[in-house]
Image (cartoon, rainbow, N blue to C red):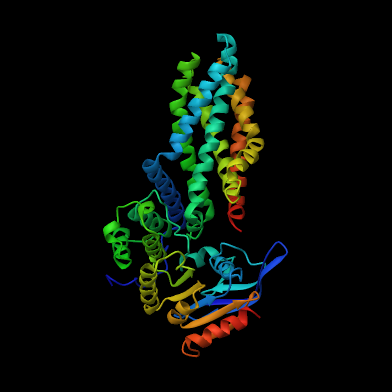
Amino acid sequence: MIEVRGLVKAFGVKPVLRGLDFQVAEGEFVAVVGPNGAGKTTLLRILTSMARPTMGEVRIAGLQLPRQSGAARKILGVVSHQPLLYGDLTADQNLRFFGRMYGVSNLDDRISEVLSIVRMSARRYDLVRDYSRGMQQRLAIGRGILHRPELLLFDEPHTGLDPDAADMLDDLLIRVADEGRTVVMTSHDLTRAGELASRVDILSGGKIARSIKRGELDRGELNQLYYEVTRG
Amino acid sequence: MAEGVGAVSRVGPRGAVGGYLRAVGAIVWKDIAAELRSRELLGSMLVFALLVILIFNFALELDLRTRQTVTSGVLWVTFAFAGTLGLNRSMAIEKDRGCLDGLLLAPVDRSAIFFGKVLSNLLFMIIVETIILPLYSLLYNVNLFHPGLIAVILLGSIGYVVVGTLLSAMAVQARTRDILLPILLFPVVLPVLVAAVRATTGVLQGLPLEDYQAWLNLLIAYDVIFLGVAIVSFDYVVEE
């Protein structure tokens, strides 16, 4: 589903990604972890064609970025730590707007379905600016899955959530992954990443330094490896 | 699959033109719906425009003859200042909560996003102009109800909004976006403002069309050229 080879991204003279290779198979749930400034968000922004690679090859479902980014965006759902929602619109209006942008058919039914999935049906006609952070993030996931994407990218989705809201988000992520979608999630939370994902990639020094499949290491060993890798 | 996330689907089977127009329409609808709720943009533009024409009215104690000659300038300065406020706010709404990223992630040609924003900005500007014109007529005791004036205002507003929308998308990325937009915008729209003021003066003084035709042509040429420039460059402006 995702093929990244020799990816370099520099801002001015400062390289953030230095020849990164990254592959994700269809149906896989991969968590990318790493310290602040490691380039996790930069990697996701390149995958979403929000940023251009300085060098290297990026393919999503066989589509080359940034040349075929329009076609690639059709199969992408993105949930960021920012909700990407309009505060002055209701949940219904936000989903209706994004549904039109993505050309979603049977929009009324799909909005009802998505709001039910993220347990927001009761707040359908309330303004998003009046929602708690957790509710906004649930609706953001609703926006991300509205067009039934093949590939979901989550950029630190647990940021700013209280434990209950974070647990609810985990349930949603598991459901999304169980339905055969490919999921890539960046996170600072090593424990959560290890529990949710089928593979954890440690991003350090602008490259994927280690790749660990679920069950290879226990929680303590994963933490130890992370600190060894990221502290050099 | 009532409770499932839903089967994977590749969206967008409809025609490219249909999808493009649907995206433009969705952005205009979204901006109108948000504005009907908040009334932030139109409210601030209107209050600001009213203050400008009141300040000019008191600052320039003019006789009737002088008043007729400065009317066009005061009118366009009012539109330009109020317009800048609206353009800044319109793009700031997109930047807050990362909504601009949400727009850019949509599988539509990015010029559709630009056109959508241009149309909604133009609509808000025209609403403000429609309210300001009769008030201006009353305050300055100048008859502004000339059919030709509508064409001049429309052409001037299109040029102003097209360039303003492009530059506001650029300025909104900066921390100093509020002061950056006017600094970037006014030098670039100077030809529009000069041509619009001259053409407005021609219309209001009842001059024959030939006397201000050149300024109208300049407005049309500016609108066409900058529309083309904006369509080509918008993708690069909004991308990192």
Where residue A88 appears, x then y in whole percent?
39, 48
Q: Quadrant of the N terminus of chain B?
A: bottom left
Q: Is residue B77 visible?
A: yes
Looking at the picture, tell me which residue is in the foreground, A94 or A62: A94
Looking at the picture, tell me which residue is in the foreground, A16 or A227: A227
Q: Is residue A55 visible?
A: no
The residue sitting at the right extreme is A13
Where residue A110 appears, x then y in whole percent?
31, 63
Quadrant hosting residue A122:
bottom left
Quadrant hosting residue A37:
bottom right
Where residue A156 appears, x then y in whole percent?
49, 68
**Relative to residue A187, is residue B203 depicted above or below?**
above
Q: Is residue A212 rendered to the left or right of residue A12?
A: left
Q: Is residue A77 rendered to the left or right of residue A125?
A: right
The residue sitting at the bottom extreme is A216
**Relative to residue B127, is residue A139 depicted above or below?**
below
Q: Quadrant of the C terminus of chain B?
A: bottom right
Which residue occupies 62% across, 46% down? Answer: B229
Looking at the picture, tell me which residue is in the foreground, B240 or B199: B240
Where residue B73 appears, x then y in whole percent?
59, 23
Q: Is residue A108 rendered to the left or right of residue A227?
A: left
**Relative to residue B129, is residue B59 depicted above or below?**
above
Which residue occupies 47% across, 78% down? Answer: A193
Quadrant hosting residue A226:
bottom right
Which residue occupies 39% across, 56% down? Answer: A100
Q: How many marks?
A: 0
